[in-house]
Each structure stands twice: as structure tokens, then as C-alpha cells.
Image (spheres, rainbow, N blue to C red):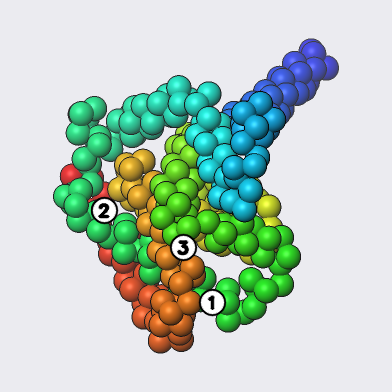
Amino acid sequence: MWVEQYGILFMDTKNKSNNKYTDLVRNIGEILIPLVIYYITYLLSYIVLTILVIEIMQLDRYIFGHETTVRAILGDISMLIGILPLLSNLKRELDGRQKQDIHAGNTTDLKNIKVIRDIPLYKSALITITLAITSSVAINILFIWLHLTESSETYNRVAEHQYGVSLVTGLILYGIISPLAEEVVFRGIIYNRIRRNYSITAAVFLSASLFGLYHGNIVQGTYGFLMGILIAYTYERYGRFFHAYLFHAAANTAVYIITSNEAISDLIITPHICLIFILISAFLLWRMKKMKLIK
């Protein structure tokens, strides 16, 4: 009798353990597979587009001297192609988040879930843009003071390519297109999946960690991790995917304009501006924390 009972108990415990392991593997797969799909699609698209432009269309003689610009444009087109297989996943995650909030009791009206924050859109957008600019510039100033940007050869190569295009081209590529593709993957899908399966805190830090690792070097990785936390926090407080994209776009645009112009860079990258921007960022984060979440 006792042996049989303990046998049954032992088997139940083992089954529960196996179920937990299976759930963990499934959750990890759900989180990482979209990133893998995006990256593989991006790489294949970039290779195909490069072959198409240089080998098939034979435009290499026309783009001579503009290789950096052409590669940057092909790269961002490939990013847009990379998110195409994920758009259905994005819609599913955004819809699922609405239903999850309703189930949690945050609101009872599906139509009102998009405006549950007790603040007009133009005000939340202004706060998001301001926080994005002040925090991103302050972090970049700190990185420059700590000589982190000088210590990474990989970062310097990436920066050389990014700033090798015209200002207008750079603003379109890095201020509009790149943020859209990356936000679809890292906040729209990955963040919401971690949030659904675990917790908001886990979602913020894990999605930020993956976002940092995605950049491939210590400087951009650290910067991406810090900005990933702020983007996810802003997304969580306002509840709109639009704010995550707006934050990313504003931060990239501000940093690109400042660091691509020596006169503006000398004016902005100072201890006083850094301190002021840190204080503004801290104040805005405090206001967002105190903000009433549910309308």
C-alpha cells in the first residue's frame, strides 16, 4: 500500500517536473524563434538584394564611391523584409495583450484599452519624445566621457558605416526604418510574449538583454540594454506600441543629428547638458511612475 502510494506520488512529481521543463522549453522557443526568423530573413534578403544590384543589374559601376550608402539602404530594406513574416505574430501579440489586460481587470471595454492612460495622446507623445532625447543623449555623453566608444573596434566600424551616409539618408534609415523593424521584433513580439508567460519585470529586463546582445558589440550592446529598459517601461506605462516606436525613433534621430555634426556635438556634449538631461529624464520617469495607470 505505502509503496504503491509513494510510487504514485513519485510518478506525479516526475510528470510535473517534466511538464515544467516542457513549458520552459516551449516558452524559450516562443521568445527566440521570432528573432531567429527575423535575422535569417534579413540576412537572406540582404544577400539576394546585393546580388541583384551588383551581379544581375550590374549597377556596380554606378554606385562606385557610394558603397556605404547603398549598403545601408539595402540593409534597411532587408530589415523591413525581415519583419514581414512576423506581422501576423505582431498582431496576435498586440491583440493578446489587450485581452490579457481585460482579463486582469484593467478595463472592461476592449475599445477603451487603447486609451486607458489618463492623458491625451499628444501629451504622452511629447513626454515620450522628451524622455527619449534626454536619456539617449545623456547616456551617449557618459559613454564618451568613459571612453567606451574608443575601446571597441567593432563599434567604430559600425559607426563609420552609419555616419558614412548623408544626413537625410541617415535620418530616414536610422530614425524611421530601423526603429520600426526592431520594435516589431523586440517590444511588439518578444516583450509581450515574455510579459504574457512570466512578469512585466522579467519582460523588461529580458527583452532589453536580447536587444543589447542583438547589436553585437559592447558599446551598442550596453546602450541597447539601457535604452531597451526605458523603451519597455514607456511602452508599459502608456500601453501603446506606438510609444515604443516613437521613443526609439526620437532617440535615434536625436543622437544621429548631434553626433554627425561637430558644431552641434561640441555644444551639446558637455557636463552641464549631461546633468540637466539626467535630471529631466529622472523627473519624467518619476512623473510616469506616479501617473494614474487606468482611466
Residue at the image point whose x is 35% and y is 50% from the top = 246
Q: Point out which mark residue 125 bears.
A: 2
* Element on which disc 3 rests: helix
Disc 2 to disc 3: CB gap under 8 Å? no
Question: Mark 2 Cα within 10 Å, few/some/many (few <14, many 20+)?
Answer: some
N-terminal of the pair, mark 1 or mark 2, is 2
Total marks drawn?
Answer: 3
* Element on which disc 2 rests: helix
Left or right of residue 129: residue 172: right
Q: Nearer the viewer, residue 46 or 166?
A: 166
Q: Point out which mark residue 202 bears.
A: none
Please identify the quarter of the rendering in which residue 162 is found. bottom right
N-terminal of the pair, mark 2 or mark 3, is 2
Residue at the image point whose x is 68% and y is 52% from the top = 216
N-terminal of the pair, mark 1 or mark 3, is 1
Percent of width and height locating residue 248: 42, 52
Question: Mark 1 Cα within 10 Å, few/some/many (few <14, many 20+)?
Answer: some
Foreground tag (1 vs 3): 3
Query: Image height check: is 156 above or below 18?
Result: below
Residue 276: in sight, yes or no?
yes
Q: Which residue is mark 1?
A: 142
Left or right of residue 83: residue 26: right
* Element on which disc 1 rests: helix
Q: Amino acid at mark 3?
A: Tyr
Query: Image height check: is 176 above or below 112?
Result: below
Percent of width and height locating residue 54: 66, 34
Residue at the image point whose x is 56% and y is 50% from the top = 69
Q: Nearer the viewer, residue 160 or 236?
A: 160
Q: Amino acid at mark 1?
A: Leu
Which quadrant of the figure contains the C terminus?
A: top left
Q: Amino acid at mark 2?
A: Ala
Please identify the quarter of the rendering in which residue 123 is found. bottom left
